[in-house]
Amino acid sequence: MAVLLVTSLLQTCASSTSFPRRGIAATAQTKTSNSPRAAVVANQETCEPPHFVDWALWEHGCVAERNVCIDQGVFIVFQDKVKPGKNFTGTQLFDTGGAFYNVPGFMDNLKGTKTPFRQPMFRTNTHRDPPDILDPVFDKCSLPLIWWPWWPFNAGDFTLASAAPLHAMLQEGIVDRNIKFTPVLDGYRMPEYIDWELQPFSNHKVETLEDLSSRERAGARCYKTILLCKPHGLWNRRPDWMKQAWHHFLKFGDFGQQIVEHYRKHLPVIKKTEGTFKVAFIERHHKRRIENYNELLEWCNTQLQLPAGSQFKEVSCVPLNLDHADRYLQTLAEMQTVDVLVGSHGAGLINHMFMRKGTSFLEIVPCGFDDPFHDDSFQVPARVQNFQFGFKLSIVSPMLCSRSQAELGDPDVLSKDEWVRGSFLRDQDVTVDVSSLEDVFQRIFSLNGSSEAYVNATLARPDFAILRQ
């Protein structure tokens, strides 16, 4: 009898194009239990559902899918369009658009570092699904925003290609704080800066897709709606037909200031004497070094003259080490005391967005790397709101640039991609002339921290914020 019953049940399942699920109503009796499922069910009655503007998602590179469970990275879709039969249209519901990541711990120009993400897998639900997906409760209280971040294991690239564009969606009202940021990282542990940058903008914990969809996870793995995104940012440019720059929606200044305010009460105290003009020089020890770094620090501390009538009384120039990503709060606190941030082109300069309004940063660019495309890393985003004032010093004399170690090393370890030639230029060491540095500071002093003065100066003199030596 039992054998016949099992056989009959399997035949019924095999011949059906849809599978019965008891859903929320049939599980009311479990609401008082301590199971993760019961907690999800109970929460549905009291939560505030996420808000998102469906018709505007495409403009930010996103699409919405309904009634989806996620099991170990696989998207299980409860819709006829993915079920075998008359209404089947296919299972490739989203294309990552050529997104790639950098293998963490390796130089970006090595063979194999630049790695394309696998295309996401979608399938229908079946009777062979795990128990929580056989009988799903579709969580309506959180809205996973799932994306494949370009170059995520570099803090600067992550900010420009992921965090800032996602923040723009919140600023535009396309989504609200009930969004659940869910990066896909191919099984790698999430860098701390991803959580630190995004958590201030969500009511839900930031989790990778791998963690969110784990069978060991306590809580929902099925959602009323999910968003699948390839945000328009530094690497994934907006299509030409949109007639909008990649940074069109970015509010870079707001983004940095809101992060600082979120963590302000947790920041360590860093003393700064009132009236001190503080300059921080970013240290680099392996590539893109400033070869006369110590000389510049000494000159800055002993010979940089404040202009007559300055609001400042003294100058303090300090080294700044940003090698430790786990010192995030320390870095935020330090940036709040800095008036000018100086550094070679690189991820460290992304920290200028945590400085106070009316402060400045100087990006030092090596020989041959002075292409307008590279301004998109720091100069262009900063000028959207001009909270901080961007300056650039381009080294043009070959006598002041030293070839990168990668170019001098074994060519067989390097990628053959065309962009690698550019990385040789980017990674040169440079020598900075003191007179050029003094010229930059005098221009900064002339602004008196005024955004209007900076805008007017750059309009009157296109080279005001761009110097060459």
Image (spheres, rainbow, N blue to C red):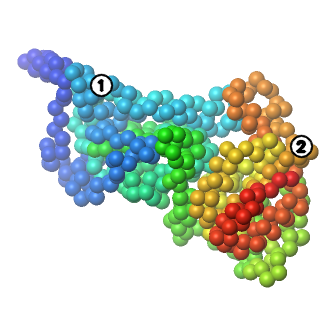
Residue 320 x, y percent position in the rendering: 74, 59
Residue extending farthest to the right is 399
Q: Residue furthest left?
A: 1
Residue at 24% over, 59% down: 46
Q: Is disc 1 in contact with disc 2, using a CB cutoff of under 8 Å?
A: no
Amino acid marked by disc 2:
Pro
Please tell me whether residue 236 is drawn above or below residue 336 in the rendered image: above
Residue 316 lies, in percent from the top left, at 79, 71
Image point (71%, 75%), residue name:
448
Q: How many marks?
A: 2
Q: Which residue is mark 2?
A: 398
Using the image as rendered, state which of residue 388 and residue 256 is in the foreground.
Answer: 388
Depth check: 285 or 432 in front? 432
Q: Position of residue 285 (x, y in %)?
A: 79, 48
Going by the numbered disc 1, the residue's amino acid type is Thr
Please say whether residue 189 is visible from this viewpoint.
no
Counting residues from the start of the chain, the first of labels 1 and 2 encountered is 1
Q: Which residue in the structure is indicated by mark 1?
A: 89
Check residue 439 in the rendering and tell me which mark sits there, or answer none: none
